[in-house]
Image (cartoon, grey):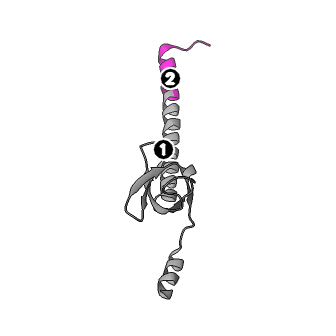
Amino acid sequence: MFLQADELMREINKLNSLLQDKLKIERDTEEEEHELLLRKMVGRRIRITIKGDPLYGQEAVITGPRGDSKNPMYWWFLLSSGEKNYKAPTSFKLLPRQDASDADASSESA
C-alpha cells in the first residue's frame, strides 16, 4: 500500500495534530499537579527536624518553592523571628492544619 504525496501529508498532519493534543493534555496535567502542590504547601506551618541544625525545633511558615521547578527540591519558609530561609522537605515536618473552627475556639478561650 503506497500513499500518494497528498495522502501522506494528510496522514502526517493528522498524526501531528494528535501528538499536539497529547502534549497539551500532559502540560495541563503537570500544571494542575503543580497548583495542587503549591496549595498543599504554601502557608503550612512546619517544624525543623534536622538535629544539629541551628534552627532545629523551630516552627515556621512555608512561603513558596525555591526556584521555578514543577517539582521543587527546596521550600522557602519564614521563621517567627522574621528570618527567611529554605530547606529540603526532608529537613522539616509539616504540622497539622488548624481549621477555622479550631482557631475560633482557641481565640474565644484566650
Residue 67: % across, % down: 42, 44
**Residue 39 versus residue 61: which sits nearer the camera?**
61
- The answer to which of marks 1 and 2 sits earlier in the sequence is 2
Which amino acid type is marked by label 1?
A: Lys
Taking depth in this image into account, of 64 and 86 the one nearest to the observer is 86
Q: Is residue 82 above or below residue 14?
A: below
**Residue stretch in magenta:** 1-15
Disc 1 from disc 2: Cα separation: 32 Å
What's the residue at 50%, 87% (across, down)? 109
Residue 107, above or below 87: below
Which mark is drawn over residue 12?
A: 2
Dot 1, crowdedness within 10 Å: few (<14), some or many (≥20)?
some
- Disc 2 crowd rating (10 Å Cα; few below 14, some 14-19, many 20+) is few
State yes or no: residue 36 in magenta. no
| Residue nearest the observer in this picture, 93 or 101 | 93
Callout 2 secondary element: helix
Q: Nearer the viewer, mark 1 or mark 2?
A: 1
What residue is shown at x 57% (from left), y 50% (from top)? 90
Q: Which percent across, then down, holds residue 15?
A: 53, 27
Q: SS at mark 1? A: loop
The amino acid type found where label 2 is placed reads Ile
> Which residue is most to the right?
1
- The residue beneath circle 1 is 70
**Would you say 96 lies left or right of 104 here?**
right
- Where does residue 13 sit, x and y in percent of width and height? 48, 26
Magenta region, main secondary structure: helix
Q: Is residue 11 magenta?
A: yes
Say if 87 sits above or below 79 in the image: above
Q: Residue at (42%, 53%) from the top-left corner? A: 85
Q: Tell me residue 21's x, y (percent).
A: 50, 37
